Structures are given as structure tokens and as C-alpha cells.
Image (cartoon, rainbow, N blue to C red):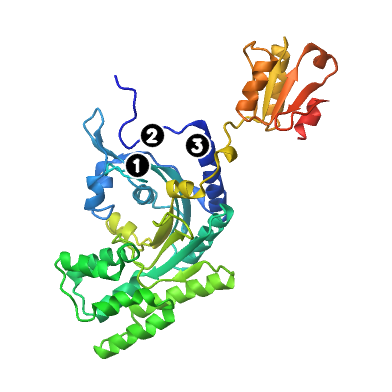
Amino acid sequence: MKLQNPRGMRDLNPEESIFRNQIIGIIKETFESYGFSPLETPLIERFDVLSAKYAGGDEILKETFKLKDQGKRQLGLRYDLTVPLARYIGMNLQIKLPFKRYQIGNVYRDGPIKLGRTREFVQCDADIIGSSSPIADAELLLLTSRIFDRLNLKVEIKLNSRKILNAIMEALNIPEKDKVEFILSLDKLDKIGINGVREELKRKGIKEYKEINSLLSTAKIKSPGELKGYTKKLFDKKKKRFENTEFEKGFDEIEEILNYLKGLRIKNIGFNGALARGLSYYTGAVFEVFLKNSEIKSSVAGGGRYDEMIGKFLEGKNYYPATGISFGLEPIIKSLKVDKKEVKKTVTEIYVIPINTLKESLEIAEELRKNNIKVDVAFDKKGVGKNLEYADKMEIPYAAIIGEDELKKNKVKLKNMKTGKEKFVSIEEIKKL
């Protein structure tokens, strides 16, 4: 028997777990401060749910972990948190809208293993179901900005709309059959540049459109108003109607989002006319978050509006406008680059060391725990010196030495493990620390 993890999986030691939980705690607190409620769904879903036409698509299904139960039913490990959300809504059609939910949990993808990519990872999602207002998108971006402020990470949030991209492709007469490939290639613009995108389109067999440079040049346009005027000219040139269409609506929605955030003095959000997001189910605003001055070039969060996905997934039973964002916990942790000395080795705040007073020490420890103090007790008779050495190595802030003399005085000897100072204090005084 080999004692090793399955490929792409790993253990997290206490130090890593404590630090991760601190980050998750910040994300969770911020979600809840914006009125999002927690939702928990199973790790295992029916495979027909995971493989539904409007779920993750063919590519993601290739990476889905498949299994069967004892009844031979086809099941799979969830590969994201959006499909379980859609399934939950389908099972609870009476749910009051808008429904603001967050979920933080493990997801699994049986894909190739490379640097920064594992087969088990954590997603932190927040979604608003049942609102078509651009202010819902703006709130997600405001929430995102707050989270990274709390994490002391400087980020740039890029914003665009699929309606804008559709308008540009319509103006350039790009056939319907080629639009998805255009979007997928355009989504790589930051990674491979304009020439790289052009070459990729050629390799895919998409002909070199006369005005392809016009499409790619939108990456340089940083104002939706400027791009709106540019696109309208293309429509006029080809004698196509632009006014009062979904295309024009896309520009208006983005301007509304930006104006709302500007009023709240959020300055780290900017328009990017080439931002695409690869998934085909996006219908409106799309956004991605990138770290400033970081070695990590990939996005650390992203999302957008998917007004049609849930309704189609549920075979048209209802229309569910939706918008959401997902935070990648792994790149966020990597980006923080916390010095090991700053990472807690244990959650314990006080280490109780009994000297022939185990029964009384356990009672004192329990009283402190009732006051939300994290306490551990030295059960083994290793001696005071050995136990203090342990507390020091584990970086526990305080050690409470309790002997018979201390009990007679209704005091404990409290040692500050950082400064080495000792003093006799009452239990009530410890509670106030």
C-alpha cells in the first residue's frame, strides 16, 4: 500500500488550514454584509444534471469525475457551484426572488495537472438570481472591491458586455457559426496579444475578415461611450439599425454600472472592450479581476450575467435573470505571499499547564472556553519546562501554570510567551485579555 494522495489532491497542514480559513472568513463576512445567504449543496450530483445541455458544456464533461452508487445510478463530482445552484432553484420553484446566495466549497475537475492547477480546489461564489437590473452587477463589483481591500491586495477590475461584443461582431458581418470561436480567441488577447489572436483565428480556419483589425483594436478603447460611437459608425456604414436594439442597450447598461460605482468612489474598475470570458452562457455584463504588480497574470476572480442559462437548464419552466462572481481561493492565497512567521501554527490562545491539578485545571479551561477563549490543556506529565517549550514552538500566546499554591490563592501564573513576563492573575482577569 502506497501512502500518498491521489494525483491532483493534497493535504493541508494546520498552518495552511488556519490561514485559508482566515481568508475564507473575510470573504464570507463580506458576502453576508451585502445580504447574501449561505447555501450548501452535495459534492456528488446526478450525472444527468452535470451533463445537461445548458450546464458546463462538452469540454468540462471530459474533466468530470464519474462514479456509480450501489444501485448503478450514474453520478459525478461537481465541477463548479453554478450547476448545483440551478438544480436547487429547479427543485424550489417557490423560492422568493431576488435570491442572493453565496457558497464556498470544493469542486473537482479531472484535468491535466500543472503549476497552479490541481484537481480539487475551492470556489467562493456569490450570485443574484431574479434581478435583471445593472445595479445587481454593480453590487457584485462593489463587493469584489471591498473583499480585495480587506485582503490588502491591489486589483484592477475589467468590465465589458457580451451585448457589446455581439454588436461589434454584427457590425463586422461575422457569421453566427464563427462567433463562439471569435469570443474564445478574443478572450486570450491579454495572454497572446493581437497578433497571437489573429494567428489563432487563422489556425481555426476562420478567414481573415477585412475589418478584423477593427474588432481587435477595441482593446485600446477604454470608454464605453467612445466604443459606442465607433460601433454606431460601423452600423451606419453597413446600413444596419443600431438604435433601440440589444446592442445599444449593452452600452447603456455598462455606463450605468460605471456611473453607479463612480458615485461610490470605486476607482479600480475600468471598461475593457475586448474582455470576453470564455463561457458561452454569458448574456450581458462580464468582469474579471487581476492583481496589480504581481507575478500572477491570470485572473483571481471573474463572472458576469447569465440571464438565459438557468431557464434553459430547467427546460424553459421560468425565466431567471442571474448574475454572479466566483473567487479563486488558490491564486488569492498564492498572491498574499505571507511570511511564515505571520502564519499561525495553532488556533490555541492559552495553554494550561497543570502541576498535580489536572481535575481543577480542566474545570478552569472549560470556564475560559465558555467565554470564547481557545484553550488547550497539557494532559501528560512532561514537566513545566517541556510544556513551556511546546507552547513556545507552537507560538501559543499565553501559558497558564496552575499548581496547588495557585489554587489556594484563586490565581494562575500567566506567562506571556512572546515577552517571557509572568504574573499572577485571577480567572476573571484572564477573561478580559
Q: Tag count in the figure?
A: 3
Three-letter code for the amino acid on which mark 1 is drawn: Thr
Residues at discs 1 and 2 in contact (Cβ within 8 Å): yes
One can see residue 6 in this view: yes
**How far apart are the alpha carbons under marks 1 and 2?**
9 Å
Residue at the spot of label 2: 10
Residue at the spot of label 3: 16
The N terminus: image quadrant: top left
For the residue pair 137 and 216, the one nearer the viewer reads as: 216
SS label for mark 1: loop
**How far apart are the alpha carbons under marks 3 and 1?**
16 Å
230 horizontally vs 433: left or right: left
Which residue is rendered at x = 64% and y = 21% of the image? Answer: 389
Whole-percent x, y for residue 154 in the image = 53, 59
> 10 Å neighbourhood of mark 1: few (<14), some, or many (≥20)?
some
SS label for mark 2: loop
Residues at discs 3 and 2 in contact (Cβ within 8 Å): no
Residue at the spot of label 1: 118
Whole-percent x, y for residue 57 in the image = 24, 53
Whole-percent x, y for residue 300 in the image = 43, 54
Quadrant of the image occupied by residue 278 = bottom left
Quadrant of the image occupied by residue 174 = bottom left
369 horizontally vs 137: left or right: right
